[in-house]
Amino acid sequence: MSTLLNTKHKRKSAVITSVIMSLLLIAIFFVGMKYMDPPAEYGIAVNFGTSSVGSGNVQPKEPLKAASEEKIVEEQQEEIKEISEPKVVEETSEKTEDVATQENEEAIAIKKEQEAKKRAENIAKKAQLEKERIERERQAEIAKQKAEKEAKRKKLDALIGGVKNSTGTATGGEGNDGVPGDKGKITGDPNASGYYGNGGGGGNGDYNLGGRKPLSRPKPAYICNEEGLVVVRIEVDVNGRVIKATPGVKGSTNTASCLLTQAKVAALKTKWQPDSKAPSKQVGTIKYRFSLSQ
């Protein structure tokens, strides 16, 4: 024993252990589990009685005498009635559900019918708007055609008035406008194919080919309401024939397609002096001046 408590720490541990064990014993004695004597019954308590049915609020302390057969039959009939009543309620509930389902189906059918009617109305409305738009466009086109026709009529009236007021004695006419009259200028050439210019030598040209002289100088047709200078670069063979013409080169002041085309045609028709000593492709220029001045 002396060897077990021979140190200060061992003695201190022994004291603490003794105190803890004492406290545990006291707690078990006073706070331990309690038992009921007799022990409590478990389960569900059932009311005292002598039959499976009953009525009233007074609890008998002893068994009742047997009920008469008539009363038992009545009780059995009431039990049967109580058992059968829920079936009636269930059938009524089913009928109610059937009616509710039928009403829902009718409501859905009505809603679908209304939606279909609405879609049909929208389609009809769009068709009507499209029809009105087409009619407006047709009326606008008719009005435009009438306006153009009226403008042509007024122009024709003016031209006819000018013809009526003219002092000439000749009949007939010539031009490309599709209206009566003789298009051109009083100072023009009756054999010319152009309708614009100053009435004199429209399309006069300057010819340059290294000393060689042109033998023929066809004039370009004056078919558009344009003026200016068109320079044509030409290539001429030893026989004096123009084999290539490029209109609108450097020096040109107007490159309208109608002027360039007619200048090229006139340049290709030009004939030059033959020269056996000239290059096979001698280069030169022709300048055509187009004027609208009176």
Image (cartoon, helix red, strand yellow):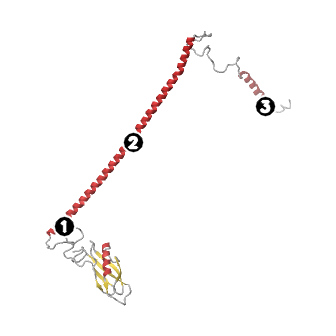
Within 10 angstroms of label 2, few (less than 14), some, or many (20 or more) residues? few
Distance of mark 1 from mark 2, alpha carbons? 64 Å
The structure residue drawn at horizontal position 32% and vertical position 72%, both measured from the top left corner, is 257
x, y (%) of residue 246? 35, 78
From this viewpoint, is residue 288 visible? yes
Q: Which mark is residue 145?
A: none
Residue designated by label 1: 159
Numbered disc 3: secondary structure: helix
Q: Image quarter for residue 234?
A: bottom left
Q: Which amino acid, by three-letter code, is at mark 2?
A: Ala
Q: Image quarter for residue 137?
A: bottom left
Q: Which mark is residue 116?
A: 2
Query: Which label's residue is closer to the chain start, 3 or 1?
Result: 3
Q: Which mark is residue 13?
A: 3
1 and 2 marks in contact (CB < 8 Å) = no
x, y (%) of residue 288? 29, 78
